[in-house]
Amino acid sequence: MSISAFEHPYLSGLVGDEETGAMFSASADIGAMLAFERALALAEGEAGVIPSAAAGLIADLCGVFEPDVVALRAGVARDGVVVPQLIKQLKAAAGSDAAQFVHLGATSQDVIDTSLMLRLKGVLTIFSSRLERLSEQFIQVGKNFGARPMMAHTRMQAALPISVADRLRSWSAPLERHRTRLQHQISALPIQFGGAAGNLDQFGPRASEVRRRLADHLGLADQVQWQSQRDGVVELADTLSLISGSLGKFGQDIALLAQMGEEIRLAGGGGSSAMAHKQNPVAAEALVTLARHNAVLVSGMHQSMVHEQERSGAAWTLEWLLLPPMAMATGASLRLASELVVKIQSLGRTDG
């Protein structure tokens, strides 16, 4: 049994999202870290920092290497990060001739932060695609019911008549803005490569070249080290909260419409153990919950910006506890919203 509802054996049936969760699995993290080490060896070989033969051997090894995960766990308990034990194992597998060139000039944070960027690129791409699909679904609802009248409500009180299209616009317009944000952020996701103190001192005048080649191999933006500058990571978290927040507004509106029962008809619904006649708006309620979940966690991400001096263990670890659940909540929100839209069988008044 998992302590996280996102991975729980049965609670994940509501709030889980396998596609997003896969990006935060141990295997995905290890794969991304090995991709960093492979790209680093190739970049250093191309820049003449290490022998090309050693670079090729390390690159090939990283493509097939399978670490001892039990030893990695013990290493994290001792070192606070997984990289020292991972590199120890990788050097042992590389052999005496190439071991000295494994991880040359890099530090643990370079590997871990770049792994995060690689995996977030996949996550944000998934979310962008889901936002596009959801927007298309709202367009279809508009085609079906957009001209119908419905009652506007301000401060929870009946106000004046509007059209279904007016309400749909309040649900769909933010999604287009969020997708634009995601597209920009995907293209700007950077490598982290600064070495022990952030200045790549071990490479001298070749530092910029190695970093550029590393970024090219990984398909990430070439950016000067940002190891203690966490505004970019926090901005990503803000976007996740914005997405789930907008979908929470959609869920809240659907739940209220279902409560009134006059202007919406949904297919299916959640059953009650005590009242067989009920069909609870489960997906809509979950969207509200997930929005509030992310609104709480995003404040913690802002706390993680306070990195003392050149590196913080405490603030950095806080990110590990907060960002993956935020991504999972956003993925689940997008999944649930898409499932909810297709359940709308009628929206607005049919009596004029």
Image (tube, grey):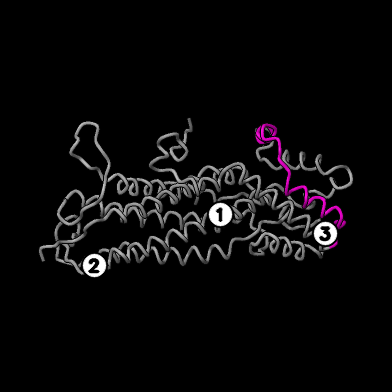
- Amino acid type, label 3: Gly
Label 3 environment density (alpha carbons within 10 Å; few <14, some 14–19, many ≥20): some
Helix, strand, or loop for circle 3?
A: helix
- Amino acid type, label 2: Gly
Residue at image coords 31%, 65%:
140
Residue 329: image x %, image y %? Answer: 43, 47
Image-based side of 284 in relation to 111, left or right? left
Residue 293: image x %, image y %? Answer: 40, 46
In primary-sequence order, the first of circles 2 and 1 is 1
Label 1 environment density (alpha carbons within 10 Å; few <14, some 14–19, many ≥20): many
Assign the magenta stretch its main secondary structure: helix
Residue at image coords 20%, 40%:
278
Helix, strand, or loop for circle 1?
A: helix
Which circle marks residue 45 in the picture?
3
Residue range in magenta is: 48-76
Residue 60 higher or lower than 12, as above or below = below
Say which residue label 1 marks. 120
Residue at image coords 14%, 62%:
350
Which of the image's four quarters has the C terminus?
A: bottom left
